[in-house]
Image: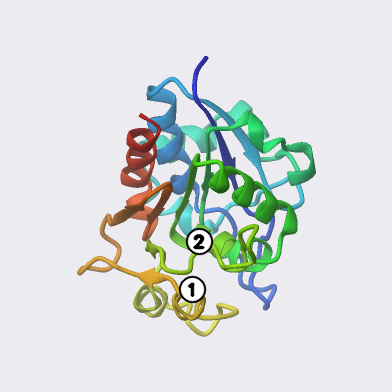
Amino acid sequence: MSQRVLIVVTNVGHYDDPSHPTGLWLSELTHAWEVFEEAGYEMTLASPRGGLSPLEPRSLKFPTYDKGAKAWHADPARMTLLEHTKRPDEIDSADFDAVYFTGGHGTMYDFPDSEGLQRIIREIYERGDIVSTVCHGYAALLNTKLSDGSYLVAGKTLTGFAWREEVLAGVDKLVPFNIEDEVKKRGALYKKGLIPFTSYAVTDGNLVTGQNPGSAKETAKKVVAALG
């Protein structure tokens, strides 16, 4: 039987200010999907509320709007997958060998407090299977606690979108919180690459994390390696 990966995307399409759209960063999905597909994995899309995952408009521009992202965006069948994602209560974590959380700033609003996502993360992590995130996808880890009440991220080496990258992207005044600071407050051993927006990914046991959109492919490859 092939390995099965649950890929989680956001349902949120704007910042606190509705005039500023956001959503799923498409290449963080497509780059990982390509790696997992090549490995022969089966994939299922889910989101905190189920249903539509809107796209971050900035992800549909150079440089991350590459051949794979363009092909997905132009494929009605693929886009339909993003219109009909599953809810957490429709997901049995036992059906999956790994979970991969995509980014985009929308995740900062609906990932951190989703009890359904926290259940899935906890169950997959505690049985030794792979929990992975890229970019702002690590928002899903912020408030996730293990069965003993401790934060999953406490004492774990991980990465995710850096505050410096928020500033360079010009959205530091729009984001609801400083995610790098928040994960550190929960005891994470946060690491980042020397050069912003370049690929950087970290594996700590069965936790695999990538820093930014450019890290999605490397993150997915580390997931494949971790699954053996």
Residue drawn at point x = 49 percent, y = 81 percent: 185
Point out residue 165 in the picture as x, y percentages from the top left corner.
Answer: 36, 73
| Residue projecting furthest to the top | 1
First in sequence: mark 2 vs mark 1: 2
Q: Nearer the viewer, mark 2 or mark 1?
A: 1
The C terminus lies in which quarter of the figure? top left
- Residue 111 visible from this viewpoint: yes
Mark 2 neighbour density, 10 Å: few (under 14) some (14–19) many (20 or more) = many
Q: Which mark is residue 86?
A: none
Question: In screen coordinates, is 9 left or right of 39?
Answer: right
| Residue projecting furthest to the left | 194
Mark 2 residue element:
helix
Q: Are marks 2 and 1 in contact (CB under 8 Å)?
A: yes
What amino acid is found at the position of numbered circle 2 in the picture? Tyr
Question: In screen coordinates, is 162 left or right of 16?
Answer: left
Q: Which mark is residue 183?
A: 1
Residue drawn at point x = 37 percent, y = 55 percent: 210
Question: In screen coordinates, is 70 left or right of 82?
Answer: left
Point out residue 48 in the picture as x, y percentages from the top left corner.
Answer: 71, 53
Residue ID for mark 2: 138
| Residue projecting furthest to the right | 89
